[in-house]
């Protein structure tokens, strides 16, 4: 072991004195060099002209703030022809001229700013006794070079929400080096085109099949090969299947009516609407976006609360109710949405009375309404009409006799219909069953799927969809033409439309099935970006977001 002088810790400065007070550490230091180099002519001078003191902050030492009392000499330049008469000595990479902080302190603060943003970064730096304001941190982040990443050969492009539902930006990735290359404040063809023109040399562009990026890529890098993104191909496929299910929904409900409800009753709603964790790309595609939005808000609230914001402050900043903030902060885990129970209405207290009149044969809305108004009901007649409609099992008096039978509904049928409506989840939840790999289906899911494919359109869509998923996953280009042809002959409208879309983007789709590039990794980067964005919620300025995403390693 070699004992090092204190100067080793302070950029080679000679430490004359170290004073420990309740305010921290003060170091009196000076340069040990005999002379200094003139910044103009580069000659060494040893002729001291004068001296002064500087008091820069340094990184903390054992949680004590450190301040230097630095003796700085001013030299007279020895070169006759040099325009510089006197100059102050410099301290290399330890301290820049006229800086109030040492370089290493600036570096630490910069890292806090990049990782945590201004407010949280300032709080952490204060707790580590390296006090800096939020603005200082943000200034350091902003000052970083903004174009440090080299133009990629293989570029991935996707959009992300700057303000969900209102403003979108574009994220550009180097798919070979797996890093973010740039962020653009919009997702227009023009901005993408402009970026490509400023960064020539991109050879392959992996993009979704949205028109903006296709146009931008074609105009900005006409020679680049465009690849349809496989992740988005699956996403589009899911959307097509969802539309098939939506169209078939009424027919499926009727089918369920005919099959008696299983003894354990609620078999279909057991379809998992949400997955805790994503597994395969197909499953990832299934994520329910509405849930994601709520989760996003939930985590934002929790994060802001961790950062020390008050609940009312959070509610104001995010524009959400104080109730939601309280609930989110108190929750042990993300509260999943449960189906709503029937809430009591203004009509509820009068329902027994209505029912009495109903059983007595009173079927007309105005008469029923008058009956309960007499008993104190203050609601509207429309509410009563709804109630009547839900219960009416006989056709109205004015229905033509020829149709009376058709419109007569048996009471059991009314009940069964209501049950079936509850038992069949929406297309958004059901589509999941069609996307999953058959060998990954649980027994329960297999039963649910069996119900769905009883409907011929769903059965065709399911077969075609599964073939497409395999075709994309295993990149079976030779299968594509046959698959597209089958889509058209099967006459399932939504899949036929989807196939037509693929044909219109033929070259890029073929490239997707031959080249390895896919912007699947974009999702991961967008998740990271969301985290950064969340910390900046409320005052996220685009350039700051960009700096933090580009420079945070
Ligand atoms: Zn000089």
Image (spheres, grey):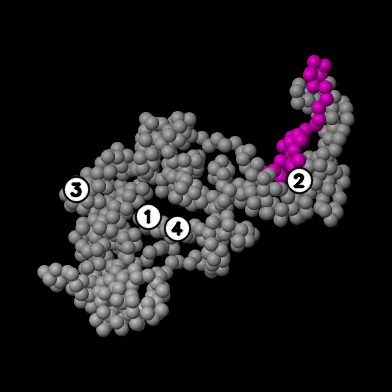
Residue linked to disc 3: 488
Q: Left or right of 383: which side holds 253?
A: left
Residue linked to disc 2: 58
Q: Is residue 188 above or below residue 492?
A: above
Q: Is residue 83 above or below residue 126?
A: above
Label 2 packing within 10 angstroms: few (<14), some (14-19), many (20+)? many
The residue located at (84%, 30%) in the rendering is 74
Secondary structure, mark 3, is helix
Secondary structure, mark 2, is strand
Where on the picture, by quarter, is residue 197? top left
Residue linked to disc 4: 292
Residue linked to disc 1: 285
Where on the picture, by quarter, is residue 159? top left
Most foreground residue, 119 or 321: 321
Label 1 packing within 10 angstroms: few (<14), some (14-19), many (20+)? many
Q: Does the magenta run of residues contain 537?
A: no
Q: Nearer the viewer, mark 3 or mark 2?
A: 3
Q: Is mark 3 within 8 Å of ligand 1?
A: no
The residue segment tinted magenta is 79-107
Query: What whole-number distance in Å separates the C-alpha atoms at marks 1 and 3?
Result: 25 Å
């Amino acid at each position: 072991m070699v004992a090092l002088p204190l100067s080793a810790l302070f950029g080679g400065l000679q430490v004359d004195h170290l004073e420990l007070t309740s305010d921290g550490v003060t170091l009196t230091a000076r340069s040990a060099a005999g002379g200094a180099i003139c910044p103009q002519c580069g000659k060494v001078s040893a002729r001291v002209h004068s001296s002064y003191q500087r008091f820069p902050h340094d990184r903390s030492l054992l949680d004590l703030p450190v301040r230097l009392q630095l003796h700085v000499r001013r030299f007279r330049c020895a070169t006759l022809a040099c325009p510089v008469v006197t100059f102050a000595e410099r301290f290399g990479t330890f301290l820049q001229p006229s800086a109030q902080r040492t370089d290493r302190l600036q570096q630490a603060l910069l890292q806090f700013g990049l990782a945590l943003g201004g407010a949280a970064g300032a709080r952490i730096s204060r707790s580590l006794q390296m006090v800096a304001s939020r603005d200082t941190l943000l200034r350091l982040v902003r000052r970083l070079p903004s174009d440090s990443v080299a133009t990629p050969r293989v570029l991935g492009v996707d959009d992300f929400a700057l303000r969900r539902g209102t403003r979108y930006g574009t994220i550009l990735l180097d798919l070979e080096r797996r890093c973010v290359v740039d962020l653009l404040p919009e997702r227009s063809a023009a901005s993408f085109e402009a970026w490509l023109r400023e960064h020539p040399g991109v050879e392959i562009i992996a993009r979704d099949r949205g028109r903006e990026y296709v146009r931008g890529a074609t105009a900005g890098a006409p020679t680049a090969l465009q690849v349809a993104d496989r992740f988005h191909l699956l996403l589009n496929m899911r959307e097509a299947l969802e539309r098939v299910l939506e169209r078939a929904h009424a027919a499926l409900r009727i089918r369920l009516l005919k099959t008696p409800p299983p003894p354990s009753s609620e078999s279909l709603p057991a379809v998992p609407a949400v997955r805790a964790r994503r597994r395969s790309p197909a499953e990832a595609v299934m994520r329910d976006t509405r849930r994601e939005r709520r989760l996003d808000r939930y985590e934002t609230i929790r994060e802001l609360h961790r950062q020390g914001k008050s609940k009312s402050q959070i509610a104001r900043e995010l524009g959400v109710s104080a109730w939601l903030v309280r609930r989110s902060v108190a929750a042990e885990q993300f509260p999943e949405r449960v189906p709503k129970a029937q809430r009591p209405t203004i009509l509820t207290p009068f329902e027994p009375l209505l029912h009495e009149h109903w059983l007595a044969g009173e079927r007309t809305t105005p008469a029923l309404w008058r009956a309960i108004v007499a008993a104190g009901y203050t609601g509207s007649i429309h509410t009563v009409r709804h109630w009547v409609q839900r219960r009416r099992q006989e056709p109205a008096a004015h229905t033509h006799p020829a149709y009376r039978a058709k419109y007569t509904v048996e009471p059991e049928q009314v009940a069964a219909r209501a049950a079936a409506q509850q038992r069949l989840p929406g297309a958004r939840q059901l589509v999941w069953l069609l996307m999953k790999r058959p060998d990954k289906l649980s027994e329960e899911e297999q039963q649910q799927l069996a119900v769905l494919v009883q409907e011929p359109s769903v059965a065709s869509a399911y077969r075609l969809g599964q073939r497409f998923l395999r075709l994309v996953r295993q990149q079976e280009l030779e299968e594509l033409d046959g698959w597209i042809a089958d889509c058209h002959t099967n006459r399932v409208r939504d899949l036929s439309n989807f196939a037509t879309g693929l044909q219109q983007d033929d070259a890029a789709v073929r490239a997707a099935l031959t080249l390895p590039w896919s912007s699947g990794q974009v999702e991961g980067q967008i998740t990271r970006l969301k985290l950064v964005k969340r910390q900046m919620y409320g005052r996220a300025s685009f350039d700051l977001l960009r700096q933090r995403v580009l420079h945070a390693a």
